[in-house]
Amino acid sequence: MRAYKIATTPPMGPVLITADGDLAEQPVQDEKKLRMPKLTMSIPPQGDSGAIAEAAKMLATANSPVILADRACRSQEGIKRLVELAEALNAPVADIGGRMNFPTTHYLCRNMDKRPLVGQADVVLMLEVADPWGQFNTISDPHHEYRRLSKPDVKIIHISLGDTLTKANYQDMQRFMPVDLAISGDAQATLPALIEAVKSAAGMSQRAAIAERATKLREDHRRMKDRARAEASPGWDATPCSTARTSAQLYNVIKNEKWCVAVSSVQWNKNLWPATEYYNFIGGSGGAGQGYGAPAAVGAALANRDKGIITVSIEGDGDLMYAPGSLWTAAHHKIPLLMIVHNNRAYHQEVMHLQKMASLHNRRMDTAAIGTTIENPNIDFAKLAQSMGLFAEGPINDPAAIGPALSRALAVVKRGEPALVDIVSQGR
Amino acid sequence: MRILISTVLLFLITSIGLAQETPPAGSAERGHQTFMKYMCYTCHGTLGQGADRGTGPKLAPGSLPYPAFALQVRTPRLDMPAYRKEFVSDQELADIYAYLLTVKPSPAAKDIPLLKFD
């Protein structure tokens, strides 16, 4: 019960229970005496009221406030509250994607414009941002030159439980980022009080100024959406298949379902698809390690199975090779997951770094393929999946074949079984 | 006299500009092979169409003027690695440029039904 309570108390996380051998071997003496202890959920901590009032004042008087949300919202209520805050301020929101935080259809959604927005902002509100420094700075590869993106006098507020998460001798921290107001508290639990404080803090003239921003923000949102579509069309009919086309084909197949993208190696889904529900995107691993995708997608599909949510994933081929046994688990336990393999036959994450290192050290530039490509032989992921009991199709080279293959795969998933479609794809 | 000097300068600048604008002769077929060999496609796509997350800008169709293209490859701005003459010759560069010039336009977003999301 303690483990369950810890796992489900914000900020939430995995809990491992180890039972020693003696305990595991001992028979239960009297089953009638077994009982489940009473579960009382902990109320998540809300930020300090004085600090919330100060944050509200900074936000209400800002000319160009921006909200960055990462692992902020864990339910539909959280999304609703964040919308309410953003509308109270007419502040654009960039959803960094640790969770599904903000509807992509809302006029204040500006996921693709995070960098210019941060550059123009006079106040930035971060909600549970895992890498604060990375939002305000860039770092070049391979020379590690830093460049500040934001104005030097930008005011930064961070509402997060991050400062309370120090729990081990060895822990990965992102680069330290000084902020002007750090509020230790759960972001979603703090939002209602912050919304009320913002409404109280804004005087007549500020309310008018806030309202005036709406027209331009609506236009900026529309432009961003147009840009996303324009960027998706080049290479539409290309072979290897365009990742934008794969994304669009996938949405076309699942758009009338309740859907969840558990894992995706491409950004198109978030930039193109209308997403409004908290379960639409579950965020990333947080650690960016290899091998997360397949087991995470199977786990999400298991969690979604009884909720009538169709779970899909766009899985990197390199990533899948770290834990292909997850496919057998999905088949064995009849876990309905529609997995697309984004098969670019490479670990593309590393290629450009290797090219830069070759250039820096005056070495041949065509050596970047060594250790980064997954060719000779090419992996047949459909056969790999079929060998473990999955319905699978591929390798697909013709973009016109993607849609029909996904429809057949969805029919299998709707019967309660996993399916895999291997699409030979562009690098990114 | 001032008009004459200005005219001569304008002529010289224009002549130099035109000379630089003319790309050297290249083979599109070899250029495609070179484009793939040096893995330009990992960031720019196999058709030079660009890629997800802004990792590589669109190169084709509608390439940069050759001097700007060559300048970017040799001494790149932003995150792109530099490709020196010792490893990617001027001829190979001209071949890649010739390949990019052969890329045909994709359908416009407004003409693709699957991109009408809203």
Image (spheres, coloured by chain):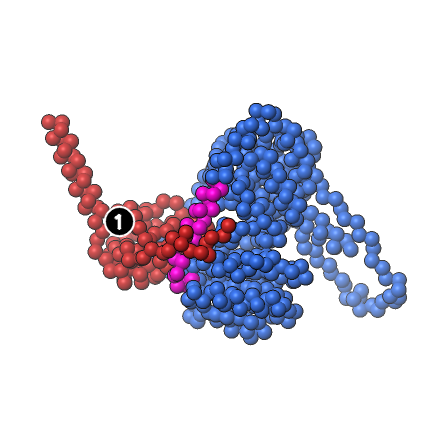
Was residue A224 drawn as part of the magenta stretch in this picture? yes
Q: Quadrant of residue A178?
A: top right
Was residue A145 drawn as part of the magenta stretch in this picture? no
Give the left or right position of residue A290, taking residue A359 as reference: right
Which residue is painted at 32% across and 53% down in the image?
A: B61
Give the left or right position of residue B33, taking residue A116 as reference: left
Which is nearer the eye, B87 or A54?
A: A54
Q: Quadrant of the N terminus of chain A?
A: bottom right
Which is nearer the eye, B92 or A228?
A: A228
Give the left or right position of residue A235, taking residue A189 as reference: left
Residue A287 x/y as whole percent: 57, 53
Q: Which residues are magenta?
A: A220-241
Up-down: is A392 above or below A300?
A: below
**Number of numbered discs on residues:** 1
Which residue is painted at 48% across and 35% down in the image?
A: A216
Residue A211 x/y as whole percent: 55, 31
Classed neighbour count for the residue bearing mark 1: other residues with Cα under 10 Å, few (<14), some (14–19), many (≥20) = some
Q: Please report, as a chain letter, where disc 1 is located.
A: B
Q: Amino acid at mark 1?
A: Tyr
- Give the residue furthest to the bottom: A387
Which residue is painted at 43% across and 65% down in the image?
A: A400
Up-down: is A403 above or below A15?
A: below
Q: Which chain is blue?
A: A
Residue B23 x/y as whole percent: 22, 51
Q: Quadrant of the C terminus of chain A?
A: bottom left
- Give the residue pinned by disc 1: B66
Colour seen for chain B: red
Residue A186 x/y as whole percent: 67, 42
Q: Is residue A309 visible?
A: yes
Q: Quadrant of residue A161?
A: top right
Q: Tag 1's secondary structure? A: helix
